[in-house]
Amino acid sequence: MPAAGPSPAPEADVPPDRVAAVRGFNRFYTRQIGLLRKTYLDTPYSLGEMRVLHELAHPSVEQPTAKDIGRALDLDAGYLSRVLRNFEKRGLIKRTTSKNDARQSHLSLTAQGRKFFAPAEKRSAEDVAEMLGALSEREQSELVRAMRTIETLLGQEADSRPARTYTLRDLQPGDLGWIVAEHARVYTREYNWDNSFEALVAQIVADFARNFDPAMERCWVAEMDGEPVGSVMLVKDDKPGVARIRLLIVSPKARGLGLGRRLTDECIAFARAKGYRAITLWTHECLTAARHCYEKAGFTLTSSQNKMSFGQNVVAEFWDMTL
C-alpha cells in the first residue's frame, strides 16, 4: 500500500476541462447576482459605475484620487474619467484640491451621493442575504469558505500570499470517506492508477474502522482553512510488536510545507510511546518524495518487487525501521 502522497507533478498546460469549468462558473455567477443587466440594483448605473461609488463610500485609502480608484478597481483611465465627470455633473461626488499637490484632486461623495448610494448598498446586502437564506447553515459555511479560497488563490501575487499553515487533529465524521476519495483523485490524476486502487484504499479504511484499537493505533488528519489536506494511519502489523504506517497522503495544495515528514514523525513518536519495537510500510518506487521522506526519517529499504498493479507496471517497496 503506498504510504505517502506523490511528489509534485511537473508544470503543464492547464487542461481544457478546467478552463471550461472556470468559464462556466463565471457565466453562472454573473447571472446569479445580476451582473448582466444593463443597470445594476435598479439604479441608472452599470456595475462598473456603482463600483466606483462603492469605492468612494468605502475608500481603500484616505482621501482617494482618481488614480487610486483606477488602481483599486483596475479601470481604464479614460472610462473612469468619463464616469467621474458624469457623477460630478449629477452632484454625486465632489473634488477637493490636494493641499500637498495642486495638480491632484481628492474625491469624495457628496451628501446627495451618500443618500443615493445607501439604498443600493442596502439592496445589495438584502439580495445576498436572500441568496444565502435558501441554504442551510452548513451550506452557507461551505459556500463562504469556497469564496474565500478563490479570493486567496486569485486575488494576490504569489510572493504576497499569506503563509500556508495547517493543524493536526484526530478523526472526525466524514474523514474516512475523504481519505478514500483523495487517494483516488491524486493517484488517478498523477499516476493514472485505475479504480482497483480506490477499492484497495476503501478496504484498508474499512478494516481500520472495524478493528480500531485506540490504545495502540491512531489516525492523524491535517487541516488547512477548515478542510482536510493530509492524513496518515498507524496500525498494528500482523507481526507482534511491529507497527505499520498506512495511507499517508498529502493533497497538492498542502505540498511544500513538510507535512509528509511531520505525519511520519508523528507515527514514529506514537509508536515509540506505545512500546512498538519496529515500524514497517509499503510504498512504490515512483513516489520519490515519499521515499526521500522515509529515508530522512531513518527508514531503510529492505525489499522491492516488480509487478503489475492498479493498471500499471510498478515497483513495490518495503521499508522498515527499528525503534
Image: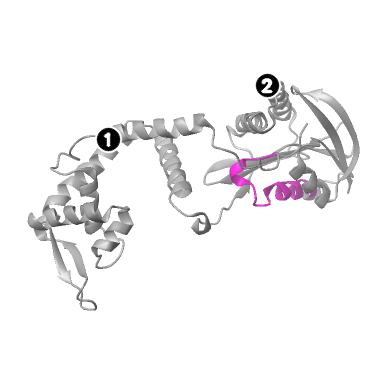
Residue corresponding to mark 2: 195
Residue 286 x/y as whole percent: 77, 36
Residue 110 in which image quadrant: bottom left
Q: Is residue 312 above or below residue 304?
A: above
Q: What element carries label 2?
A: helix
Write the start and end of the magenta stretch as one range: 249-268
Q: Do the residues labelled 2 and 1 touch (CB within 8 Å)?
A: no
Q: In this view, does 16 lie to the left or right of 289?
A: left
Residue corresponding to mark 1: 130
Residue 132 in which image quadrant: top left
Gap in angstroms between the C-alphas marked 2 and 1: 42 Å
- Residue at 59% x, 50% y: name it: 166
Residue 245 x/y as whole percent: 78, 39
Type of amino acid under label 2? Asn
The residue carrying pointer 1 sits among few (fewer than 14), some (14 to 19) or many (20 or more) residues within 10 Å by Cα, namely few
Q: Is residue 228 left or right of residue 40?
A: right
